Amino acid sequence: GENVEQHPSTLSVQEGDSAVIKCTYSDSASNYFPWYKQELGKGPQLIIDIRSNVGEKKDQRIAVTLNKTAKHFSLHITETQPEDSAVYFCAASRLSGGSYIPTFGRGTSLIVHP
Amino acid sequence: KAGVTQTPRYLIKTRGQQVTLSCSPISGHRSVSWYQQTPGQGLQFLFEYFSETQRNKGNFPGRFSGRQFSNSRSEMNVSTLELGDSALYLCASSLSQGPSEQYFGPGTRLTVT
């Protein structure tokens, strides 16, 4: 089955700095890669996603890059703010039974110091 | 538009008991997925329902089961609870079958003593 490695497990930055979280996956059939932000006491929330036919996608301060050949994808957050502090999960999804089923990374706890 | 709701939010059960958790998806969403989140194993896929049919199942024992009703509401059941079943159980709904955005509920925190 799919295996997703996520690094680092903890990331501490100063407000205004950039943060980068990296993930690798093993199944070349995975073709949809969402990123989720989970705040304490809440369920994960999709913040950005990318499909395998796209190499990069940006949404304001957040960007995701995908390298299909190397099987890795990364989340970039620029100009970090204290409210960005949360746990971030990457996922690699493949089509199964008509749906895209995700395999998640273990999460990165991002701490943004004011 | 109301988000995904899960009931109850917190639950304490004893080993050997069974439990039923409920999920109401966003209105109009027909796909409902369930996930287990633990510090040790992370976020793991349990199963997914679409139009009352289970389309996918994760690698969990048969003690974990679920169903979906005609109004898309879903329930999951865990029988013969074990200490290791203590976890946050998350439900997510999405509009269609494709790689569309999944909206997660706040989860049900299950503690097995």
Image (cartoon, coloured by chain):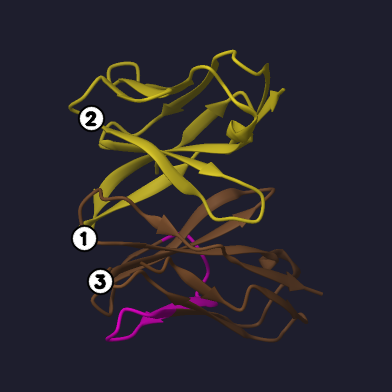
> Which circle marks residue A28 in the picture?
none
Q: Disc 1 versus disc 3: distance between alpha carbons?
A: 9 Å
Q: Secondary structure at mark 2?
A: loop
Read off the residue under disc 3.
B28
| Chain under numbered label 3 | B
In percent of width and height, residue A46 lies at 41, 44
Dominant SS type (magenta): loop
Task: Look at the image and tell me in which quarter the C terminus of chain A lies.
Answer: top right
In the picture, residue B112 is in which quadrant? bottom right
Q: Are marks 1 and 2 in contact (CB under 8 Å)?
A: no
User: Do marks 1 and 2 share a chain?
Assistant: no
Q: Secondary structure at mark 1?
A: loop
Q: Colour of chain A?
A: yellow
Q: Disc 3 versus disc 2: distance between alpha carbons?
A: 28 Å
Q: Disc 1 versus disc 2: distance between alpha carbons?
A: 19 Å
Read off the residue under disc 1.
B96
Judge depth for marks 3 and 2 and give the one in front.
3
Task: Look at the image and tell me in which quarter the N terminus of chain A lies.
Answer: top left
The crowding category of the residue bearing disc 1, from other C-alpha atoms within 10 Å (few below 14, some 14 to 19, many at least 20), is some
Query: In the rendered image of this protein, does residue B79 appear above or below residue A78?
Result: below
| Chain under numbered label 2 | A
Choose the circle earlier in sequence order: 1 or 3.
3
The crowding category of the residue bearing disc 3, from other C-alpha atoms within 10 Å (few below 14, some 14 to 19, many at least 20), is few
> Which circle marks residue A52 in the picture?
2
Q: Colour of chain B?
A: brown
Image-based side of B25 in relation to A109, left or right: left
